[in-house]
Each structure stands twice: as structure tokens, then as C-alpha cells.
Amino acid sequence: MNETSSWIGLAIIAIIVLVIISLFLRFVPVGLWVTAYFSGVKIGIGTLVGMRLRRVIPSHIVRPLIKATKAGLVININDLEAHYLAGGDINQVIDALIAAERANIPLKFEQAAAIDLAGRNVFEAVQVSVNPKVIETPFIAAVAKNGIEVRVKAKVTVRANIERLVGGAGEDTIIARVGEGIVTTVGSSINHSAVLENPDGISKVILNKGLDSGTAFEILSIDIADVDVGRNIGAQLQTEQAQADKNIAQAKAEERRSMAIAEEQEMQAETQRMRARVVEAESQVPLALADALRSGNLGAMDYYNMKNINADTDMRSSISESSKRESDE
């Protein structure tokens, strides 16, 4: 019974020791410290424990430091940890520093870290600095002085400028400035044929403007990849202007026509009013004659003479109208 109790006690003690050792090895990365030691990186166990306490994964710091040490770079582990805590990509920064050192490009850790924290890919920037990049613009439409549209596509060879990566403009600015230069150059040409005959003139004019000022790139060359003839903008504008003038003239003519119709209608209304007044006056004549006869101001013979005159006038008018119709026929 005593022996059984002793074995149980030893087993419990062994389990407790194993748990303590497991927790110690998990909290204190002894394996990582051994790897760093034999890789030439002098780092203390206390530093690794401190990283754990600061909630920093030690392998994310030590492995890039081992890579940098093997490449011959001297980097302070505190700088790496600070960059990690700031949200930077340590592996990308170390790769960029190694690539820059191999290409004899002066690049310090502080500068690479600033570029990385600025949101730019510092490793890609070093690569573009070593191996220039080609930026292709879309077709850019411009109009020569003779009104013919010319569509130009350019290829811009650029090299990253490490010094201006922080705060420098990107590819969109390069494309916009090249497009502005193309529009200006084509617009100053007398005709589109001059652009087609000498497309490299566009490149020369653009390069002389220093378009890479304030950008993260240095323009090495601008090559015109394609030149196409587009629409006849001048003729199209003239056609549209002629149509606009025609519409204005039609509107004015319609206005004059409307005014003439209104005037004619007004004259017809006035004529009808005059006829109404004449009819009204004629209707008063018999009454006036009757009143004159009653008052003795008009005799019977005078009345008959007036009737004869009216009848004679009507007859003459009828004969005149008949003669006019016969002459027309």
C-alpha cells in the first residue's frame, strides 16, 4: 500500500514538472534563442521574454534579424520591434535593405521604415530603382489646329526615386502630366499631318517640361507607342454651329409669322367692327328719313330722287363688275 502511494505521488510530481516545463518553453522561446545564437545574432533570453510581455511575437522580430545579419546588415533589434509595433512590415523592409545593399543604393533602415509606414511597397520601389518600370498611358485625344482629332498612346519608362518616395506623387500623376503634354503639343501643331510625320516631337517637348518634378519617379524616356487619326472635330463643330444658326433663323421666322398672323387677325377684327358700325348706321337711315319726312325737312320728291340715284349707282356698279369679269375671262 505504501509503495502504491509512493508511485502515485511520483507520477503526480512528474506531471506537474512536465506542465511547468511546457509552460516555460512556451513562454520562453528557447528554441528561437538557440537558432539566433548559432546564426550569429546575440540576443538574451530576457529580451525574448520582454517581447512576450509587450505582446510581440518574437519570431516575427528574430527571424528577419537573422536574415539581415546573414546579409551583413547591422540593425538594432529595438528598431525592428518599434517598427513592428507601429504596424510596419519588417520582412518587406529587411528585403528592401538587402536588395538596396546588393545594388549599391544608399538606403537606411529609418528611411525604409518611413516609406513602409507611408503605405508604399519599399521592396518594390528598390526593384523599380534597379530595374526601371514602363507605365503605359491610355489613348489620349487631342485636336490639332486644323480641327482633326489625334489619339496618342505613350509608354513612359520611369525609375523610382528613393528620396522622394515619402510625399511624392504616384503613377496617376505621371500619366496625367504626360497626357497634358500630349494635348498641348498636338494642339499647337498646324495640322494633324505634322504629328503623324514626326511623333517623336511629342516626346521631346514633354521631356523638356520636367514632368517628374514632385513625383516618386524619375522619367527616363517617353516613347510614342501608337498614333491614330480620330474625328474631324472642326467640321463637326461647324456643322453643329450651322444647325444652331438654322434653328435660330427658323425660330425668328416663326416669330415673325406669328406676329403677322396676329396683325392680320387684328385687322380682320377691326374690319368686322367697322362693318358692324356701317350696318348699324345703315339701319338708322330709314328711321332718319321717316323722321325727316314727318318733320317736313325732306319732301316726297326728294326722297324719290334719292332712291333713283341709289338705283342708278347700283346699276352702274353691276355693269362695271360684269365688264371686269368678261375682261378677265
Image: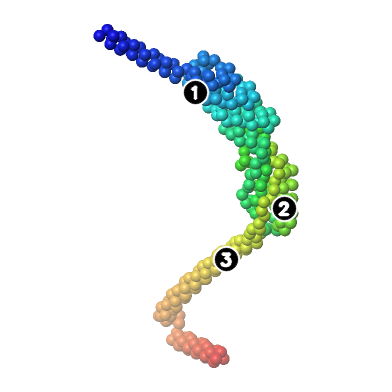
The quadrant of the picture occupied by the N terminus is: top left
Label 2 or label 3, whichever lies nearer to me, is 2
What's the amino acid at mark 1? Answer: Ile
Please report the residue visible at 28 percent of the width from the left and 11 percent of the height from the top.
4
- Residue 270 sits above or below residue 215 on the image: below
SS at mark 3 in the image: helix
- Residue 121 sits above or below residue 270 on the image: above
Residue situated in front as seen by the camera: 323 or 182: 182
Q: Which badge, 2 or 3, is on the more N-terminal residue?
A: 2
**Residue hosting label 3:** 250
Residue 67 visible, this orientation? yes
CA separation, marks 3 and 1?
82 Å
Please report the residue visible at 69 percent of the width from the left and 50 percent of the height from the top.
224
Q: Position of residue 70 (x, y in %)?
A: 61, 25
Figure coloring: rainbow
Q: Position of residue 105 (x, y in %)?
A: 68, 31
SS at mark 2 in the image: loop
Label ID, residue 266: none
**Residue hosting label 1:** 57
